[in-house]
Amino acid sequence: MVTVLCIYLCVGSSPTNTCVEIEKQALLNLKDGFSNGRDILSSWNGDDCCGWKGISCNNVTGHVTRLDLPRYSNITIGKGFTFLANTMPTEATYNLPGELRGKIDSSICELYHLTFLDLSYHNLKGEIPKCIGSLVQLIELKLAKTELVGFVPNNIANLSNLQNLELGHNHNLEVNGLEWLPHLSNLRYLDLSSVNLSSATDWPSSISKIPSLLELYLNDCGLPQVHPKSISHMNSSTSLQILSLSSNTLNSSILSWVLNFSRVLTVLDLSQNQIDDSIIKSFQTLCQLKELYMGFNKLSGQLNDYLPEMCFAQHDLEALDLEHNPFSSGLLPDFSWFSSLKKLSLKNTSIVGPLSFGQLPHLASLDLSLNHLNGSLPIFEATKFASLQFLDLSHNQLSGTLSYTIGNFSKLWFLSVSSNTLNGIINEAHLLSLSNLQILDLSGNSLLFNLNPNWVPPFQLVYFLASSCILGPHFPTWLKYQRKLLVLQISNTSIMDSFPKWFGDISSNFSYLNFSHNKLSGVLPSIKMGYMSKWDFSFNNLSGPLPSFPPDVFSLFLSNNMFSGSVSSICAMSQRILTYLDLSNNLLAGPLPNCWENFKHLWVLNLANNSLSGRIPNSFSSLEEIRSIHLNDNNFSGEIPSFQTPRMNLRFIDFGDNILEGTLPTWFDGLIVLRLRGNKIQGGIPTSICDIKSLQVLDLSSNNITGEIPQCLSHMSSLSDVEFPKETFSYGIYEAMIFNSIQIGFFVDETALIWKGKSQEYGKILGLMSIMDLSDNHLTGEIPQCMTTLKALIALNLSRNNLTGFIPDNIGDMKLLEALDLSRNHLVGRIPTSFSNLNFLSFMNLSFNNLSGEIPLSTQLQSFEASTYVGNIGLCGPPLTHQCSTPGDINGENGTYKDMDFGFYISLGLGFCVGFCGVCGTLILKKPWRHAYFQFFNNIDDWLYVTVVVFTNKIKRRFQIQN
């Protein structure tokens, strides 16, 4: 009997191989809740859910205990700020083949025996299930960076066994209050970074009541300020070792709460807050501190003033980050007495003078970038920096050569000396021992690479940036051994060669390639690129047809080359992510393909200065995200397509110098630059153009536009309101993540405008321009008085039209005007004296009109050349040589002159009538006066006859005597 019982117990307790059916069904429901669950979780099939990917079960009961499905498997968000972040990078390991999308189905709450739940790094975009509090056996809950929304359920308080809670980096997740937090008495790790805690005024007291908490991350949470009076009554936990409160707006009063943990706190991150110098004395009590991060605060004074207050930590401090604080300028302090220091970041702390170091044998990371260090680079002694792995001296004023001793640091994986004034030669000796080097940034210097063509580097670079150095004239052959390259930035490096055949095979995962501003020739090879890749091969001599593009290009810059043929190959690209496309200044020809409706995310399209022809495709109106379109200087014909779509973000249109015809379409508010010059557009200017309140540049010149200038122009706020915010026309392009900073390049919109009589290209300052150019059309009528309300306008060109009437009297109200061209019209009247208010006017052309009168004196009008006024026959006075015969009254305006002229002619007529009638009437009515009048003229006649005869006889006698 005992034997049978033992056998029964052994069989009954043997491991089961199948999961519980109800839990299996819950998992399948969870899978169905994801829109792409069937693809990403394809292994979730079969009877035994315990064998599915990411699922673990209890060997005895068969209950599901672990659901472990993070997108990546070797990333820790919370600890990223410690000095370990400056250690050699490793590639993220993908735990799943794709990103789960959808919502967390409530069926997950039927997995009552779960102790571990991780769905991090997915696109869940839903709320945390309200039933999450029923999973009372959970020990770890990880939902970081999952796009969760809504509020964190208060019933999380039921998870009393929870030791690890990660909800960080969900920017749309909120917490009303943290009163549930003290119920998690076993919590050791808490990350709520980027969760909205602005309403959690109780956050200090709630956290202080968690006795076992070791690590706390509340970065970028909008934390309310801490009030010192309330803190004095708190019974705080004494276990907290790591505290990160960065990227809030906390002031120095937070230190009164932090000091409650001073005996055990080893890592403190208060970076990106509003903390000032008042915290200096507080450092003395942080006796166990090993890592201190105070960057991006308001610490001022001398950097050397802070170091004595940290003398307590001279043997223990391993990481010190004071970057981006407004310290007073001073020399680099001596940190050699911090004997354990591993990381030191003093980026942008106003350090000046030469670069000198003490003995720092344990230093692994040194960042002194964005300062004012000058002089030559020191000779790096390996004994002083035996552990150095990360060195950033970029953006200083260092000069001279790069010492060979830099090659002594065999552990170095990051080296940046970019944006200095270094020169000299780089050869194999500089790089021979750098076997761990992964990121090398020498850009912005004048270093000359002199490497043997057969040299094989000891390292495998991931990032190589050397713009403005000299790598040419030949293509650097040592690059063919770099099989892990993600970023290659060698623009303006004097390469005058063609691409070698091996270049397309050196890496299959390029994220950024920049060969611009070289003299590369030949055909662009087929290149394998990674997701969201960026290409820049502009300003070279590349030729042939456009190459086949990789499927996931984010930005493509091939401008200023000699590519020819059709552009139809762009339709083969994956249109999901293409954002920037610049093929300008090439030899491309033929019509545009009609595939633009697929480019949903295109921001910038530049096809200018080619030989493209045909109609502009109607599918252009489907470019929902487009900001800027350049089709100028081609041979496009037909009508301009309409761009009226509800989601249109279009700001910049340049269709100038084509053969476009038809009438101007109706435009939309938001447009800032509209350039259609040099086409064959007909009809009038639509009044709808007045509704574009944001328009800063309007160029409709050199067309066949007729009719009058609209009276509604005063509605254009950006041209009438001096305070209206001006736009810039540059777009940030993500280039490369260089360790802990993002290197940004910019695409800058450019266009040619007539400025002061000359065509000039404008780019970076285009957003400061306010220009209206309607010249060289067939406009008629008078210049509207309302145009003088465009007080923000700096250039107005109405020349070469058929405008009549007077120059508006109050043109002086346009006080910012710098250029005015009204030439070759039929304007009449005098030049208004209000021109004296145009203090910035430096270019003016009023030639070939019918203006009259004296050019107003005591104004800057005399400073212009005479050619400004030529062709106006009635004008006189300086600077013209034709002087006025009788000084006119120049104090009136054209309206007053018009009234005076009219009154003069009326008075002249009345005076003649009165005088004539007065004389003739008297002679008719008075007979004696009549006889006297005629007798007077008869006597005059006799006197004149006698006088003439006598004078004639005298002349005759004089001639006879002379003979």
Image: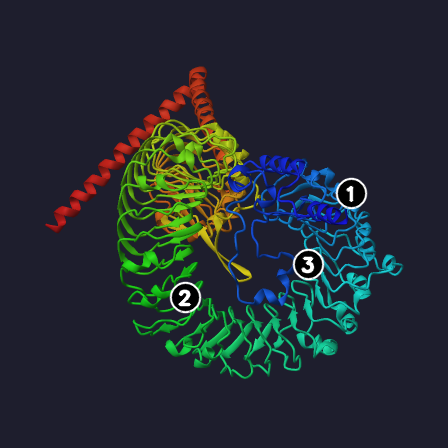
Residue ID at (79%, 61%):
253
Q: Could you say where residue 249 lies in the image, as x and y percent from the top left?
A: 71, 56
**What is the C-alpha distance between the residues marked 3 and 1?**
25 Å
The local crowd at label 2, few if under 14, some if 14 to 19, many if 20 or more residues have their Cα within 10 Å, is many
Pointers 3 and 2 in contact (C-beta within 8 Å): no
* Left or right of 105 on screen, residue 806: left
Coloured how?
rainbow
Question: What kind of element bears circle 1?
Answer: helix
Q: Mark 1 — residue?
A: 154
Describe residue 616's horizontal placement relative to residue 842 as left or right. left
Give the structural element (helix, strand or loop) at label 3.
Answer: loop
Q: Residue furthest right?
A: 233
On the question of residue 842 being in view, the answer is no
Quadrant of residue 828 within the rendered picture: top left
In this rendering, position of residue 686 left or right of residue 86 = left
Residue 246, numbered label: 3
Decide which of 922, 737 is in the foreground and name it. Answer: 737
Residue assigned mark 2: 466
Q: Please identify, in this view, whether the residue under mark 1 or under mark 2 is nearer the observer.
A: 1
Q: How many marks?
A: 3
